[in-house]
Image (tube, rainbow, N blue to C red):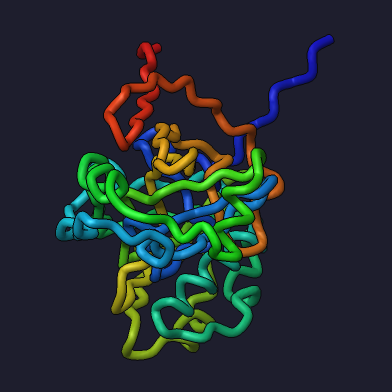
Amino acid sequence: MSPAPKKKDPSITFLNKFGYNVIRLPRTGIEPLHVIGRAGPVMQLLGPISAIWTSENPEPRPGPPDPTVAVNGERTGGLDLSFGLSILSSTLQTFGITAPSLDAAFKNAHSVQFTYSNVTSTSVSPFAAGNYLSRGRLQTDNAVMSSYLGSDKAKTYLILDVLKSDSITVTATDSNGTEVGIDLPHIEGIADAKIGVKPSNSSNSTITFTGPVAVTFGFAVMEIAWQGNKWVVTSAPPSGALSFGAGFGADTEEEEQPNPTVFDTGDFDCRLDLKVPD
């Protein structure tokens, strides 16, 4: 008997259908042209590529935030309460609130769902990133980066696009998926002028938090590798395996393997994953 296929975790895959990966604990400071490294099962944000790359071409600037209608209002699947509250606590801290324990406010809940509003996309085009990478010098002696470049199992990814939101809505449900009330006085006790707290229905089962800054909760990447004296670029389809967040990564799904086509472009090899639609 064949083993049952592993069920995908909705908390790390709900953005995949839109072409994005999930940041498990949304926060600020994750931007286009930042590098993510994967060593074994763990994904880690390493920093901006400009810290290890000096190019003759200017570093491309991301475009202005662009409203993203398709993702706006998208609700996650039901998340385990403890994990969901860690996401909420992390988001509130990003908004400038050091939240005490939220357990009392969600004492009747078994799980929570999140919905992001006011969603925008900030991106750098692949061509612009390719031009930047095509001429320059890599600091191969960087102690952190060399550990990724020197391992066949390690991978690095360049962020091209990030999703941001300054408004997150939380819906509480019981073990049967029925919405249950959130104890609003406990929530209001942690709020101040920095954030807005608004119940979305009379039962208080859904509450919206709006903060002064937009947090990053999704991203799209391309895989990059240093071969010889040039970068090789490969598409990286969105996957739960690319989801990352502090302390997470060991339980992700298997990453899809690209099937690249290589084009000789002189000093810069560009690999594109050509797929036939299902």
Q: Position of residue 4 (x, y in %)?
A: 75, 20
Q: How many marks?
A: 0
* Residue 249 appearing in the image: yes
* Residue visible at 32% across and 72% down in the picture: 210
Q: Nearer the viewer, residue 257 or 88?
A: 257
Viewed as shown, does residue 153 lie left or right of 128? right
Q: Position of residue 116 (x, y in %)?
A: 35, 56
- Does residue 187 lie above or below 148 as drawn? below
* Residue visible at 38% across and 59% down in the picture: 53
Residue at the farthest right position: 1
Q: Nearer the viewer, residue 17 or 185?
A: 17
Viewed as shown, does residue 172 lie left or right of 66? right
* Residue visible at 70% across and 23% down in the picture: 5
Q: Nearer the viewer, residue 73 or 15?
A: 15
* Residue 14 appearing in the image: no
* Residue visible at 31% across and 53% down in the picture: 136
Q: Position of residue 10 (x, y in %)?
A: 55, 41
Viewed as shown, does residue 276 lie left or right of 251? left
Which quarter shows the C terminus? top left
Which quarter shows the N terminus? top right
- Does residue 22 lie above or below 270 as drawn? below
Q: Position of residue 264 (x, y in %)?
A: 31, 24
Q: Nearer the viewer, residue 16 or 276?
A: 276
